[in-house]
Image: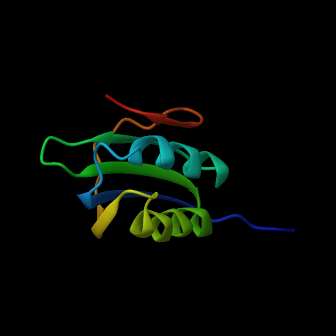
């Protein structure tokens, strides 16, 4: 039997992460990893992410967020307690 350990996590991504397709990239990566969650821009220029799913997939998302898409310059990724609403399924861009 293959046990699956689920985890939920929030992330705050700081750097040049707005205006570079970061939310769309995060949505695609989250879906590819089989996670459910949401991503949104924050007024301070950061991006907030909330994700739930297999613990290894959540960890992989955190590593990928630290790299970001081409055009982004990630300074740091912080684990946070996110207030973003968690969708019932899928990964979405919140506004």
Q: For the C terminus, give its image quadrant.
A: top left
Farthest left residue in view: 44
- Residue 16 sits in which quadrant? bottom left
Residue 21 falls left or right of residue 57: left
Farthest front residue in view: 71
From the top left corner, tell me how far across and down residue 62 is, in percent: 45, 66
Residue 78 visible from this viewpoint: no
Residue 81 visible from this viewpoint: yes
- Residue 81 sits in which quadrant? bottom left
From the top left corner, tell me how far across and down residue 6 is, in percent: 59, 60
From the top left corner, tell me how far across and down residue 37 is, in percent: 48, 43
Total numbered labels: 0
Farthest right residue in view: 1
Q: For the N terminus, give its image quadrant.
A: bottom right
From the top left corner, tell me how far across and down residue 87 is, in percent: 49, 33
Seen in the picture, residue 58 relative to 87 is either above or below; the reply is below
Nearer the observer, 59 or 23: 23
Residue 2 falls left or right of residue 76: right
Which residue is found at the position 31% from the left and 66% from the top? 74
Seen in the picture, residue 57 relative to 41 is either above or below; the reply is below
Which residue is found at the position 56% from the left and 50% from the top? 30
Nearer the observer, 41 or 85: 41
Nearer the observer, 35 or 70: 70
């Amino acid at each position: 039997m293959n046990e699956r350990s689920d985890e939920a996590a929030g992330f705050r991504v700081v750097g040049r992460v707005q205006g570079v397709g970061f939310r769309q990239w995060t949505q695609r990566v989250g879906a590819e990893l089989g996670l459910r969650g949401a991503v949104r821009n924050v007024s301070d220029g950061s991006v907030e992410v909330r994700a739930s799913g297999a613990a290894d997939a959540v960890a992989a998302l955190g590593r990928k967020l630290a790299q970001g898409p081409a055009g982004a310059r990630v300074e740091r990724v912080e684990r946070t307690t996110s207030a973003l609403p968690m969708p019932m399924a899928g990964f979405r861009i919140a506004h």
